[in-house]
Amino acid sequence: MIAETISVIVPVYNAEKYLDRCVESIVAQTYKNLEIILVDDGSTDNSPAICDAWAKKDSRIRVIHKKNGGVSSARNAGLDACTGDYIGFADADDWMEPDMYEVLIGNAKRYSADKSSCGYIYYGQQAVCAPAETCRVLQSSDEIRLRIVSGEHNAVWCAIYSRSVVGDIRFDESLKVAEDWLFNYQVCLKMSSEVIVNTPLYHYEDNIESAMHGINEKKISDRISVLEYIWNSEYSREKHLPQLAGEYVSAFFYGADECIRENVYKEKWYKKKVKKELNGKLMFILRSDMSRIVKIKVVMYVFAHPLYVRYIKKKHA
């Protein structure tokens, strides 16, 4: 019986410092049936040559050279070209444990799961951490969607997806951030099961030069736009998630509080895009079964925003 192929898509943009480490960790996987697609997204350093050199070393590697279009554009180019039974992603400045894909595909087959995820180690701001989530199998549509709605489990690089659930879903190239959140949500609507193992098999490098650093109107607006998309999708469903309000509020305050901590809450775009976001959903939120403390936080944010700003600033002083 021929083993299933995993297509690993790696967007590459000016990653010459880290690229060899990343590709080496993929090539050295104990699960050998891989299709490795390096997408050179218009790099201006030595990355294109490094990609081509790797393709000469390993017949499993294919290289796509394209004009710069961002990480979503690069991932989409890889999705359009890949042929694997399962699809995975890696960032060019990260690396993985040698048995990561063997564990992921083993779990996917064992539990007939559409998505198989693992834990990760995060290196950033002088901290190293790994999720403390227990190993579990999700076989309820509500459980799967709720995991994504929260906005906390949306990395695409520590998972593999069956080709059937990805289908023609692609990353939104207009988004600067949260494109993985939207992708995961759209995919999860087609999923019937997911398996998660807490073992940290992926190493995520918080590169200060990456697009994720800093805060601006585009990044916050994108996150709010994805949050609004998910809310509208869930609210239009015949059966609401019982915990929808709670997860929505949690995801909202993740971005709103960051704006306050970074002192951009006085900007016009914040007042127009962020501050008004809760208003139309207020009654739904207040009628939910969220804790009284969280509801008070929501009311304070909407009706006593200066007081809420002082509260957040004092809390993070």
Image (spheres, rainbow, N blue to C red):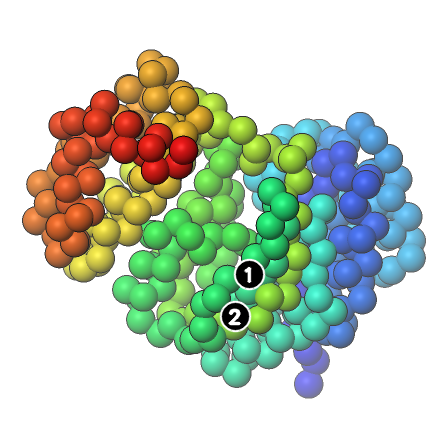
Q: For the residue labelled by badge 2, is the local secondary structure a helix, a strand or a loop?
A: strand
Q: Residue at x 86, y 52 (%)?
A: 55
Q: Position of residue 238 (x, y in %)?
A: 16, 56
Asked if residue 130 is positioned above or below residue 150 in the image, the reply reads below
Q: Residue at x 37, y 59 (%)?
A: 147
Horizontal side of 7 relative to 114 (left or right) equals right
Three-letter amino acid code at the position of disc 1: Ala
Q: Position of residue 294 (x, y in %)?
A: 20, 47
Asked if residue 236 is positioned above or below residue 88 in the image, the reply reads above
Label placed on residue 130: 1
Q: Position of residue 281 (x, y in %)?
A: 16, 38
Q: Which residue is mark 2?
A: 198
The quarter of the picture where residue 52 lies is: top right
Distance from disc 2 to disc 1, alpha carbons, whole Å, reads 9 Å
Horizontal side of 215 relative to 80 (left or right) equals left
Asked if residue 156 is positioned above or below residue 315 in the image, the reply reads below
Of 27 and 129, the residue lying toward us: 129
User: Which of the two labelled residues, at mark 2 and mark 1, occupies the earlier sequence position?
Assistant: 1
Q: For the residue labelled by badge 1, is the local secondary structure a helix, a strand or a loop?
A: loop
Of 59 and 160, the residue lying toward us: 160
Q: Position of residue 283 (x, y in %)?
A: 9, 41
Three-letter amino acid code at the position of disc 2: Asn
Marks 2/1 in contact by CB < 8 Å: the verdict is yes
